[in-house]
Amino acid sequence: MNRPVPLALIGIGAIARAQHIPTLAAGSSFEIAALIDPDPIQGSAPCFASLEDALAADIAIDAVSLCVPPQARAGLAQLALDRGLHVMLEKPPGATVSEVEALRARAYRNGVALFASWHSRMAPGVEPTQRWLANKRVEHVSVVWKEDVRKWHPRQEWLWQPGGMGVFDPGINALSILTEILPEKLSIASARLQVPANRAAPIAARLQFDIAGRPAGEAEMDFRETGGEVWDIVVETSGGTLELSRGGAELRIDGKRVAELGSEAEYPALYTRFRELVAAGESDVDLAPMQLVADAFLLARRETVEPFEY
């Protein structure tokens, strides 16, 4: 496949404008054939209010990239897969584990690619971290993942509704990195969620981890951090201590900076992977991070905290 794949971008919100559109415009693997959003939009490509409208128009579309809130992804993905289109899902890939599993089966039946993307796994520090940890025993994992929801998710009410995940929307980025870099299986031992009195999803979470059945660490996630975002993972091992900071952009081993690597390549790497899957007609749907979130909700002790308003 030498020609760019015509792609419809669905959901023209903050992440689409900040990451997807610039990445697609700068690359050669895909071309934006349509922009789709229920609210009126303007763009360099034809704009439509719905996927149905775009499919009814006289334009070629071979793939879609879904940037709508997770509660709306399953229905749109089903329609696209049934029309023979390849589908890329922003993270988290859906509102439930089972609906994404069903999408994987649907993609297989229709002979098209489904990609559940995890952009933080493409952070430049993740692969060298995975290599360094490969032959070591992990003794303790500590995650601190905090940001200001008003800064990073302004007026995004869907975050607080069932299926929106609240603080786990960014927190799942940390879990996606952990499930990629750790040489043994990570699981949730216990969880405590703080849920605003007027919301359905948590604003903060504390998790206790097991690794291969032994107690091995914790995570602290919070949407109320106003002193500057913190996206850090520390892994203590039999062979030293590794610090992966700034969401995977900075790597230190035993206090020595290995590299400050930047994070500009995450979305280009996602679309490179999606193009590979499209060419092969294969799917890449790893639900391990989402399963950890589901387990946290199942095991959680819930604490009601003060109401949250934007």
Image (cartoon, helix red, strand yellow):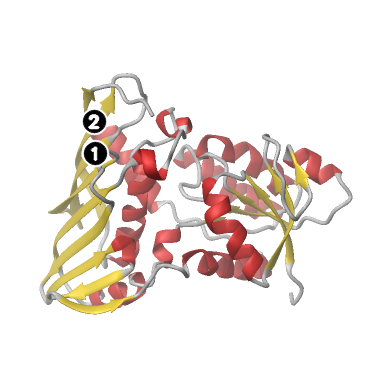
Q: Please, what is the three-letter code of the amino acid marked with disc 2? A: Gln
Task: Tell me if 286 is positioned left or right of 33 in this view.
Answer: left
Reply above or below: 114 against 225: below
- Name the residue located 30 percent from the left edge and 46 percent from the top edge: 147
Point out residue 207 in the picture as x, y percentages from the top left corner.
20, 43
Q: Please, what is the three-letter code of the amino acid marked with disc 1? A: Ala
Reply above or below: 114 against 252: above
Cα distance between the residues tagged 1 and 2: 6 Å
Task: Tell me if 61 is positioned left or right of 293 in this view.
Answer: right
Which quarter of the image is occupied by the N terminus?
A: bottom right
Residue beneath disc 1: 205
Q: Which residue occupies the foreground of this view, 235 or 46?
A: 46
Label 1 or label 2, whichever comes before in sequence order: 2
Question: Callout 2: few (<14), some (14-19), or many (20+) C-alpha neighbours within 10 Å?
Answer: many
Point out residue 149 in the picture as x, y percentages from the top left corner.
35, 40
* Residue 216 image-quadrant placement: bottom left
- Name the residue located 26 percent from the left edge and 43 percent from the top edge: 226
* Residue 124 image-quadrant placement: bottom left
Residue 194 numbered tag: 2
Point out residue 131 in the picture as x, y percentages from the top left corner.
30, 77
Question: Callout 1: few (<14), some (14-19), or many (20+) C-alpha neighbours within 10 Å?
Answer: many
Residue 221 visible somewhere in the drawing: yes
Which quarter of the image is occupied by the C terminus?
A: top left
Q: Which residue occupies the foreground of this view, 105 or 72?
A: 72
Asked whether the beta carbons under mark 1 and mark 2 sit within 8 Å of each other, the answer is yes
